[in-house]
Image: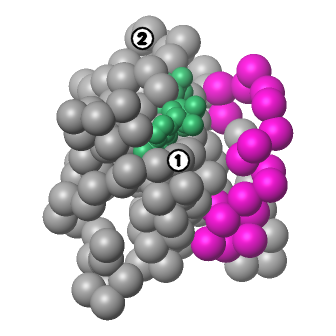
Amino acid sequence: MVLISNSTNETEKIGEKIGKNLRGKEILALWGTMGMGKTALARGIAGFFGLKEMVSSPTFAIMNEYRNSRINIYHFDMYRVCSEEDLESTGFYDYIDKGIIIIEWSENIRESLPETAKNIIITPGGDEKRRKIEIEGIKIDKDIVG
Ligand SMILES: Nc1ncnc2c1ncn2[C@@H]1O[C@H](COP(=O)(O)OP(=O)(O)OP(=O)(O)O)[C@@H](O)[C@H]1O
Ligand SMILES: [Mg+2]
């Protein structure tokens, strides 16, 4: 499914819609270049579970963990991950099945992405603020699309 976002806020809303349809152990592989809105989308997903504020807190960690009584979210930024060895040292494999995994810069771990990962591909939509967000393997409720 392809959704169009026209603003940061709309990207967050799309993230919330994705969050609504997650069961809690998905691996979400986000694709898209710098500034495409991967973190904005992650903020929306976490926001659905009431964890929005945590995503906006700045940090240099490769993995940020957001959790409450409902959910564990492991938010990876693979920007600086360049090898399988790097990836293993982040503990990535230990988090599989422990919660929702959100991966930014999937491009950098392309060869190591688990087969069960669901791809979310963000590309420019023509205008400065416009984005095409392609979502694979996650149902988005029809009534809330748009
Ligand atoms: N439709 C849109 N969706 C998301 N962000 C948008 C949109 N239009 C403009 N922006 C702006 O683009 C930037 C997106 O930043 P964000 O940190 O979410 O991107 P990112 O893909 O995570 O980048 P990075 O690769 O650096 O991690 C923000 O400054 C946001 O305000
Ligand atoms: Mg980001």
Amino acid carrying label 1: it is: Thr
Quarter location, residue 68:
bottom right
* Nearest-to-viewer mark from 2 and 1: 1
- The residue wearing badge 2 is 83
- The residue wearing badge 1 is 8
Write the start and end of the magenta stretch as one range. Answer: 46-63
Disc tally is 2
Q: Which of 42 and 129 is in front in this view?
A: 129
Which residue is pictured at 50% across the width and 65% down the height?
13
Q: Nearer the viewer, residue 128 or 83?
A: 128
Rate crowding at label 1 as few (under 14), some (14 to 19) or many (20 or more) other CA atoms within 10 Å: some
Q: In which quarter of the image is the N terminus?
A: bottom left
Pick out the residue farthest to the bottom: 143
Residue 19 horizontal side relative to residue 122, left or right: right
Image location (x, y in percent) of residue 20: 49, 78
Which residue is pictured at 31% across the width and 73% down the height?
146
Image location (x, y in percent) of residue 122: 31, 40
Q: Nearer the viewer, residue 87 or 7?
A: 7
Residue 71 horizontal side relative to residue 10, left or right: right
Q: Is the shortest distance between ligand 1 and the CB of mark 1 under 8 Å?
A: yes
Quarter location, residue 139:
bottom left
The answer to whether one can see residue 29 in this image is no
Residue 18 lies in magenta, yes or no? no
Q: Of helix, strand and loop, which one carries label 2?
A: loop
The answer to whether one can see residue 130 in this image is yes
In this rendering, the answer to whether 13 lies above or below 55 is below
Residue 61 horizontal side relative to residue 13, left or right: right
Which residue is pictured at 66% across the width and 65% down the height?
47
